């Protein structure tokens, strides 16, 4: 399993900020309860190519617990117009195009690698220009759980499995492997191979 994954986070100003960007997008989604969302925490995955930021938010909105993966790109995703969440101006990186991660192959591949034991969530490194200033504590901790039969049969079956990344959490998802998110006293399955 890759244990060296890290997400480089710059001390920077974002316009709009992430809560505003998320709320504006969620307000347009038919599957979201009306009302303001409260961000409970987030976790990240590292893109092996180092080009795409992958950040996943847990948001309480009304009675719903939402799971919102986002990808951050330095240029528009070809063919991704209908999955665009919005753009932000990043004071260090410039314009970033933000996409619904459930529809971005880079984020989906990160989830799949995490489910097959090939990738862990990223360590959060805070940088000020070109200097590492802090390792941030994880708000949300991700762990992998696998079906006992699948563990005995090896990874071959996982090649045929479908990666499921729910947007609304709470329903039980049974699968060959699951990712469990824990934050505070709460936990939920955030992805599965079925």
Image (cartoon, rainbow, N blue to C red):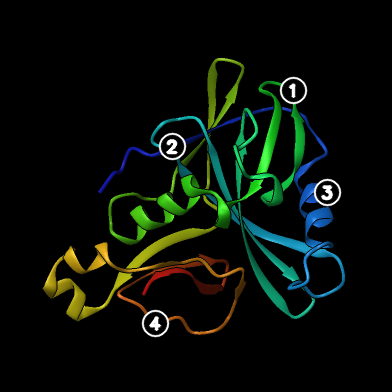
> Which residue is disc 2 drawn over?
6
The mark that comes first in sequence, 3 or 4, is: 3
| Residue designated by label 4 | 174
Nearer the N terminus, badge 3 or badge 1? Answer: 3
Q: Please tell me which residue is depicted at 55% across the width and 38% down the height of the picture.
A: 53
Residue 188 position, x and y percent, is: 52, 74
Q: Which mark, by number, is residue 91?
A: 1
Asked if residue 29 is positioned above or below residue 55 in the image, the reply reads: below
Q: What residue lies at 81% left-to-right and 56% top-to-bottom?
A: 23
Which quadrant of the figure has residue 64? Answer: bottom right
Of mark 1 and mark 2, the one earlier in the sequence is 2
Q: Do the residues labelled 1 and 2 touch (CB within 8 Å)?
A: no
* Mark 1, other Cα within 10 Å: few <14 / some 14–19 / many ≥20: few
**Mark 2–mark 4 contact, CB under 8 Å?**
no
Residue 20 marker = 3
**Which residue is located at x 63 percent, y 28 percent?**
75
């Amino acid at each position: 399993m890759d244990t060296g994954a890290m997400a480089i986070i710059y001390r920077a100003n974002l316009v709009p900020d992430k809560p505003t960007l998320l709320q504006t997008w969620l307000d347009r989604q038919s599957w979201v309860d009306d009302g303001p969302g409260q961000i409970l925490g987030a976790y990240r995955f590292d893109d092996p190519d180092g080009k795409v930021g992958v950040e996943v938010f847990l948001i309480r909105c009304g009675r719903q617990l939402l799971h919102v993966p986002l990808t951050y790109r330095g240029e528009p995703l070809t063919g991704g117009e209908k999955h665009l969440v919005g753009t932000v101006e990043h004071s260090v990186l410039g314009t970033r195009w933000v996409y619904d991660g459930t529809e971005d192959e880079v984020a989906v591949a990160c989830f799949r690698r995490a489910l097959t034991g090939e990738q862990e969530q990223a360590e959060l490194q805070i940088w000020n220009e070109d200097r590492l200033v802090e390792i941030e504590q994880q708000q949300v901790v991700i762990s992998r759980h696998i079906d006992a039969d699948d563990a005995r049969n090896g990874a071959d079956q996982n090649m045929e499995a479908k990666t499921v990344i729910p947007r609304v959490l709470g329903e039980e998802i049974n699968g060959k492997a699951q990712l469990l998110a824990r934050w505070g006293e709460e936990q939920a399955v955030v992805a599965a191979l079925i």
